[in-house]
Structure formats: C-alpha cells, structure tokens
Amino acid sequence: WVKTTMTTALTATGIDGAANSATTCTAAGASSKIIQTVTQGATADTVSFFIRRRTGTGTIEITPDNTAFTDITAALAAAASATAGGWYRATVSATLTNPAFGVRITTDTDAVDVDFAQLEAGTSATSPILTTTASVARAADVVRTVGLPPFGLTGSLFAIGTPTRPTAAALNQRLAGLRTN
C-alpha cells in the first residue's frame, strides 16, 4: 500500500471483533490516499472494503483505479446509526488493467477504520477472506443442511443483516405454520 499524506495504524477492532485487526487511516493533509496497485491484464473486477468513520465529517471516497472516486460519505453516516459497530461494505466494480484501488479522505485529520480490503474477479463482492500481506486463492464456501430438507445439498451462503424482533402474533403465526407443514 502506498500512502499519500496519510498515517495508518493497526489499532482498530475489526468487523470480526478481533482487537487491533483493522487499520485506522488518518488524513495528514487534504485528499489523503492509500492505494494498492496490482499487476494484471484487463479483467472485470470488484473492489470492496469494510469501512467506518472514526472521526471528522469530510468526504470519504473509494477508487478502483486511483482515477475515478466514488463518494461513500452518506453511506458511512447511515451505517453509523443503523449497523452494529457502524461498518459499511463499500464496493465498486470496473474493468481494469493494473488496478490501483484504495481510499481517499478529503479533509485533514479525518479518520476511518478499514478492514477486509479485497480485489476480486467478477462484478460483485463475495465473502471476505482474512489475509494480511499476500493474495489468497478462494476456497469453496460450503453450507450443508443437517436434518432439514432438502437433505445433503451444498452451496454458498453469505449474509449481512440486521436482526429484527418479530411481534408475538407474527411469531405465533410462524410457529403454527411450522407445525402444520
């Protein structure tokens, strides 16, 4: 990663709850950036980051190519009040040759926490892979049902959501439906 007027420290608790596993990026000037360049031929790629605001109110952007920047400021503000820990998964897809992806903080002294930065082939983000300094080949995600139909099927599952508490009437209706089916 190449930093331009930005300081970084591995001091934030990550989205997985592990202490000191996410990086705090702090602007040390206007339009501070942290960019990772990957050498590859032209392919359709998706860049994703789990990111949350730590301090400040300025614009936060992500880029797949260090040229086109996507403003995620409003999404970060919404995530801060709507999700546990305030994490937001920012993604952008593009067809890239030698992608130079990263984060830009436009206001001096603003800071964000970043976790699970990924560049992957395809047009959508998949489940995050824990790695530090080297690329990793994706192992197959496998979900196996046990004791529930359809028996023995395998597949992939990745979910991010906010649990909701059903009303008593809705819960009774679901339980009644399970008893009769």
Image (cartoon, helix red, strand yellow):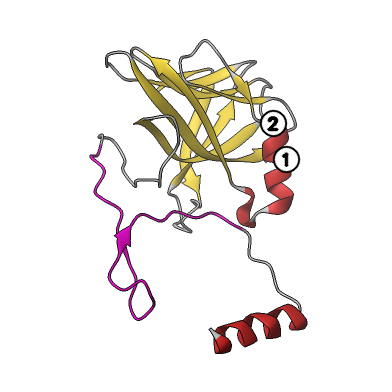
The residue depicted at 75 percent of the width and 83 percent of the height is 168
Q: Is 38 left or right of 111, judged from the image as shown?
A: left
The residue depicted at 72 percent of the width and 78 percent of the height is 170
Quarter holding the N terminus is: top left
Q: Position of residue 154 (x, y in %)?
A: 29, 61
Residue in front for this viewpoint, 83 or 104: 83
| Residue ID for mark 1 | 77
Mark 2 residue type: Thr
Mark 1 residue type: Ala
Magenta highlight range: 136-161
Picture layout, residue 179 above or below residue 90: below
Instruction: Give residue 44's quadrant in the image.
Output: top left
* Disc marking residue 73: 2
Instruction: Give residue 151's quadrant in the image.
Output: bottom left
Q: Position of residue 16 (x, y in %)?
A: 46, 56
Residue in front for this viewpoint, 148 or 75: 148
